[in-house]
Image: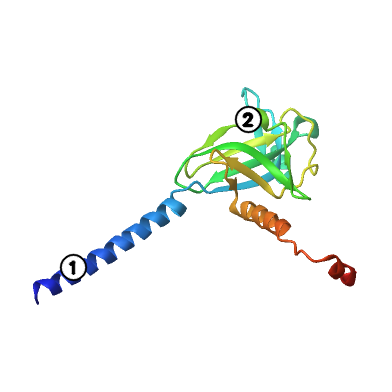
Amino acid sequence: MSKTDFAFWLGLYAGVVASATGLWTLFRELWLERARLVVTAEEAWLVPVKGQARPLVVKGEEMLKTMAIQDHQRTPILTVKILNRGRRDARIETISQFIEGGKSHAFGDLLPQLPFIVPAEQSAVVAIGKDGGYAHGDIALDRFYAVDGADRIHPLSERYRRRLRRLLRRSKPLTSGKARELEV
């Protein structure tokens, strides 16, 4: 094998290894290392505990029956859990809910609890109705989303649903007046 053949194969090998390393680094930075948030809402109750400053959050009617908690001892709440599946911390700036017509609903009960940090691979829970004023069924449990410090909407399904809606609004076909008359 001549020196030029050796140099060619060594260069080819180095190019393949460098490309694979670069692609892996790009994938890791864009997908694995990024904060990926899952936002879920559930109805629950706040139950005061003797000797504790903080009340207990109880989910499910069966648990209330097991604990023998009366109706007057509990406060209905809506909990919003944010699970960070990524490997970077996420700073939550806003928690809202999409409603019909492409609008968002912000909750006054959540404003004093914001902003906060959700550490990597951990979760955080915020509550609506801790001070009363909430009844189960008042708020739908779907389409909640969080906005992080980089102004990204989580979960990804809501982000892309919003982009698609914007795109569809912009791309309405333009037709001439005569064509519109014929369509009607």
| Residue at 32%, 59% in the rendered image | 21
Residue 112 location in percent, x, y? 65, 27
| Residue at 57%, 45% in the rendered image | 152
- Depth check: give the residue in front, 134 or 45: 134
Q: Is residue 57 above or below residue 49?
A: below
Q: Which mark is residue 113?
A: 2
- Depth check: give the residue in front, 95 or 167: 167
The C terminus: image quadrant = bottom right
Give the amino acid at mark 1: Leu
Indicate which disc, 2 or 1, sits on the residue closer to the N terminus.
1
Residue 13 location in percent, x, y? 23, 67
**Disc 2 to disc 1: CB gap under 8 Å:** no
Residue furthest out toward the bottom: 1
- Crowd rating for badge 2 (residues with CA inside 10 Å; few <14, some 14–19, many 20+): few
Describe residue 98's horizontal placement relative to residue 82 as left or right.
right
Give the amino acid at mark 2: Gln
Residue 129 location in percent, x, y? 73, 33
Q: Nearer the viewer, mark 2 or mark 1?
A: 1
- Depth check: give the residue in front, 111 or 180: 180
| Residue at 27%, 63% in the rendered image | 17
Query: Mark 1 = which residue?
Result: 10
